[in-house]
Amino acid sequence: MYSSIAASLIFAQLALPVTLEQDRLTACMDEAQRDPATAIATANEWLEGTSGTGRSLPQQCLGIAYTALLRWDAALQAFTTARDARLVDDHLARARLGGMAGNAALAGETYLQATTLLLRAEEDAIAAGQPVMAGQFASDRARALVALGLDSEAAMALAKARELAPQDATIWLLSATLARRMDDLENAQGWIETASRLDSVNPSVGLEAGLIAALGGFHEAARSSWQSVVDNAGGSPQAATAQLYLQQLDEAPSQQ
């Protein structure tokens, strides 16, 4: 779970006024999805005629193209360069581009660099008046911290994420998962209940709810959660895992 890539990495676009340059970026990004190698050539040609802040858009296109090719180091460099080309007070653009760079670092398993980039993106998002975005970056930063084995620091990042983006079910799910792994079942139970209220149909939430219940000794509650995943998300990886857990529960000695 903690190695997953934020979906916004590939598809996020900056909220800019529609201009010829923005149209050019849109076309380049579309090409990056269809034919990333050609998009790289297009973006490099575009860069030849730019300077200063004008370099940000072609660098963003380069980042998207490298992402499509899973070339994470190159994507990281392109997104970071795109961010740094922005004016220092253009916090919204810098936040989004910094978040893309941080997620490229996360995908490329350069976790320490990811934490630095994502913290800076959080700060820019807050300065831009975008607390939900900042919370999502804090959640991404927690993933990197877990990968580094820094669970306590990850828990603090997730606490910040919950404060900034309290309606984001994924943040509550990640919080519950980490709490379970840290043997904090009381908080894990409360947080998975919140995740379920916010996103009751998410099979990952049902899967995690069953694990927390089972560890707490509530085997029938675990069975109910896992069965709901099987019934409602048939064919999904989560349903396959839930079915395996149900089999293990059936094979376990009877619980008194």
Image (cartoon, rainbow, N blue to C red):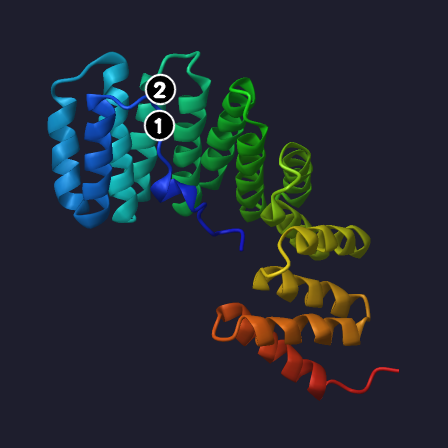
Q: Position of residue 106 (x, y in %)?
A: 44, 43
Mark yes or no: residue 183 visible.
no
| Quarter where residue 131 is shown | top right
Looking at the image, residue 131 lies above or below residue 190: above
Q: Position of residue 239 (x, y in %)?
A: 55, 73
Looking at the image, residue 167 lies above or below residue 182: above
Name which residue type carries label 1: Thr
Which residue is label 1 attached to?
80
C-beta proximity under 8 Å, tags 2 and 1? yes
Looking at the image, residue 186 lies above or below residue 93: below
Residue shown at 59% from the left, 79% from the top = 244
| Quarter where residue 130 is shown | top right
Front in this rendered view, residue 69 or 14: 14
Q: Residue furthest front?
A: 18
Number of the label disc, if any, that sits on residue 21: none
Front in this rendered view, residue 235 or 244: 235
Number of the label disc, if any, that sits on residue 84: 2
Residue shown at 26% from the left, 42% from the top = 66
Mark 1 is surrounded, within 10 Å at the Cα level, by few (under 14), some (14 to 19) or many (20 or more) other residues, namely many
Relative horizontal placement of residue 238, taking residue 11 as reference (left or right): right
Name which residue type carries label 2: Asp
Looking at the image, residue 68 lies above or below residue 137: below
Front in this rendered view, residue 110 or 67: 67
Relative horizontal placement of residue 43, taking residue 195 as reference (left or right): left
Q: Describe the element under mark 1 as helix, strand or loop.
A: helix
